Amino acid sequence: NAGSRALGTQAASQVIEKVLQQGGRYTSRIDLFGEDFYSSYLPLKNANGQSIGMLFCGVPSSELAALRYKLLSMIGGISLLILVLMGVIVWYLVGRAIKPLLEVEQAVSLMAAGDLRGRDLMVAGSDEIAVVAAALNKMRKKILALMKEINSSSETLAAASEELTASAGQTAEAVNYVAQSSVKMAEGAAKQAESLENTDKQVQDMGKSMED
């Protein structure tokens, strides 16, 4: 008991038959010294191969139950730790995989709202997300260039419109001046005609006076 040899202990008949008579191994759960044991018997043989005794090894069932509980607890703890580590790894990998996609989605939303001030998307690799990011960068630059060109054309058009308005004003002033000059010339011509008519009448009156 407690690690000591069990010398002189009477074995069960089935154990004697299996081990001593047949020379085999016997393993079973037995009651020994008032305690439940998991036991195993092996035959001891001489040089001629005859069984001359038995070798017994037994472990109390309570110790095995405690060891099994300890092992199960250890396995459960290790399994839980592995699950936590796997969750962290999956979260990290998924986060790394989704981050570029979220950046692309945000860039598209800003462009749809008319905001083109964002920086270029920096997505490494050659997968679909990287290809889409590169295409969005090119599209944003082309839209900015087009907007600058439209702005420049609008400024040029506005300047030309101002010049045209100024020219139209000057033309209107010139037409008005010509019209006023024409009116004055017409008035002067009318006065000259009236003066000539008066002069002609005076000449006629003078001629009649000389005849009288």
Image (cartoon, rainbow, N blue to C red):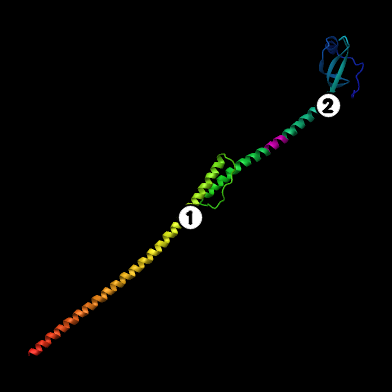
Does the rendering let one see residue 108?
Answer: no
Residue that appears at 84% across and 16% down: 41
Determine the image quadrant of residue 187.
bottom left
Check residue 85 for magenta coloring: yes
* Magenta stretch encompasses residue 130: no
Residue underneath mark 1: 148
State whether residue 184 is above or below residue 30: below
Left or right: residue 101 versus residue 47 is: left
Type of amino acid under label 1: Lys
Image spot of residue 186 (x, y percent) = 23, 75
Identify the element where label 2 is drawn: helix
Q: Quadrant of residue 198?
A: bottom left
Q: Residues within 10 Å of mark 1 (few under 14, many from 20)?
A: few
Is residue 65 at least partly visible in the picture? yes
- CA separation in Å, label 2 and label 1: 85 Å
Disc number for residue 63: 2
Q: Looking at the picture, does residue 183 appear above or below residue 9? A: below
Q: Which residues are magenta?
A: 81-87
Q: Quadrant of the C terminus?
A: bottom left
